[in-house]
Amino acid sequence: MKVFEANITHQVSDYLINNLKNVKSVEKANQKMYDAFGFIHFFNSEEELQVLKDTISFSQNVVSEPDRAEYGDFQTSINLADRVTSHLIAKNSSPEIVIEPTCGKGNFIIASLKRLKHIKQVFGIEIYRPYVWESKFNIIDFYLNNPIDTKPEISIIHSSVFDFDFKVIAPKNSTKEILIIGNPPWVTNSKLGSLNSFNLPKKTNFKNHSGLDAMTGKSNFDIAEYITLMMIETFQHQAGSIALLVKNAVIRNIVFDQINNKHRISEIEKYSIDSKKEFNVSVEASLFYCKLNKEPGFECAEFSIYTAGELRAIKRANRRMEENDNNRFGWTLEKFVSNIDAYVHSKSIDGICPFEWRQGIKHDCSSIMELDKENGHFINRLNEKIKLEIDLVYGILKSSDLKKTIVNETRKYTIVTQRKVGQETNYIKYDFPKTYEYLNRHQDIFKLRKSSIYNNKPLFSIFGVGDYSFKPYKVAISGLYKTFHFTLVLPQNKKPIMLDDTCYMLGFDKLEFAVYSLILLNCETTQQFLQSITFTDAKRTFTKDVLMRIDLLELARTFDKSELQRHLNNINEKYNYKLMLNFWDDFIKQMTPIQSGQFNLFA
């Protein structure tokens, strides 16, 4: 049965019709609901009171429940909510004030009422009106099945989390322990914007990214991250704790930004959950837990929620944390790492790479720019056979192609329209008429590219292209795959091979330099280092920022020469090369910064 599009049990509907049938004023109805269950303003108007009475007077009414998953709305089961509150009990949490910033159907509130015995007030905020009513009905149902003499005051408020003023709560309860609990939406601001949702913060670029970073997506963020930070900033000076289910990336971002924000949170912990089991979605997510009003903490301990649900397991986990016998990520020695303990063994090469890592080519027009070659013809993804001048066509590798140690041929080809970003493309019309005719014929597809980086750029523009793209020898790695393996990319038919924008690379003019780099990057020290600073559940395991931390010069200076020769011999034997170490000193010299001196006229 449904009322206000919200599910209601027959037990609750029977209770309400029996106790409110003769009540005509909203004031008296609200007083009854306060006396029985602690609700503040159960009804907002006499119209709501009358609609509820009229609706539950009928035995059945059926309203289909909408799928709100696209809004990041994944309702938490009572079992998972119980696990979270069990964890809080084991952490000696005893809140008097419970706040759920996006309360949904109220399962976290019910779990809190069930297990946390000293609650005086509950605040649940929810933008979706049917959930507001369903929360109220579920709380009534809980109390009818679990009679309790003393009940806290409960306010279930129909409001956007971004419009509700949480700062009103903090000063009134400054001496009371507070708990912020719940499951904020797992969705980005751009996704909600595309759905025309009004449940958005007023300032969407809240990390103040500018220029290309803002245009290419760094200003896109999880709504849950915004809400979590809003809660931290509002209540960080008040005793209590936060327990929110969020994506793993949100927790990493909060810990990463602590170095600048220095929020008064500590004992930061991450409890992984099985999102497929709990919500039937393939998202890496966890319970984010921290204590409020503490000296700022800069690291996060990692556990599983499924062992955390038992008191003994939690106490064991706490002991392991004290003994540093668990994985911890965060800041150490002014560096952000994924495994603080493992980082110690390879920290010596954490610096700045002397060569600049570059991302591969980005065109966002794969149906036209991505080509196969069959029987001497190029075929695009529209299955069109096309004839092109060969000059602008290059072999290209994707992340999935970087599995071997050395690659010198490609499955795919691409058209490289520019040698540097922003270069005029008019020359194609005169120098390569077949290519121009093909591209121009599909100009409408190029115009459909959504990214603003192509705005006001020459026709058929691409990004991630420069002199480095045309280096004959490259060392590359996939940004998407979880394998810590680097590949040497050699020319194909005397032309440099390109990489797509899911790959990162170093470009070299000399084969020996590329091979030396390959050996250093695939050595055990580099592998240990990368494993200690990367997160395997990240959308991209490797990024330019990560790769630029590999100090190849420091690694080369300390690398054992006999070990280097052994790796070189293996490559020579396997690939029939005759490479030697006679360019090693030149390689070191090229990586060594030039010391700039200043002539002192007055010496």
Image (cartoon, helix red, strand yellow):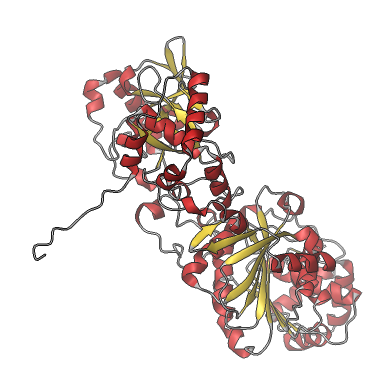
* Picture coordinates of residue 70, whole percent (x, y): 62, 52
* Picture coordinates of residue 398, whole percent (x, y): 49, 31
**Vertically, is 23 above or below 395?**
below
328 sits left or right of 379 in the view? right
226 sits left or right of 508 in the view? right
Depth check: give the residue in front, 50 or 1. Answer: 1
- In this view of the protein, can residue 182 be seen by the observer? yes
Q: Residue at x 56, y 30 (%)?
A: 403
* Picture coordinates of residue 256, whole percent (x, y): 52, 62
Taking the view exactly as shown, the residue that stands out farthest to the front is 562
Depth check: give the residue in front, 235 or 359. Answer: 359
Q: Residue at x 46, y 63 (%)?
A: 204
* Picture coordinates of residue 466, whole percent (x, y): 31, 37
Q: Which residue is drawn at 57% across and 83% down?
A: 237
Depth check: give the residue in front, 21 or 471. Answer: 471
Q: In which quarter of the image is the C terminus?
A: bottom left
**Vertically, is 82 above or below 218?**
below
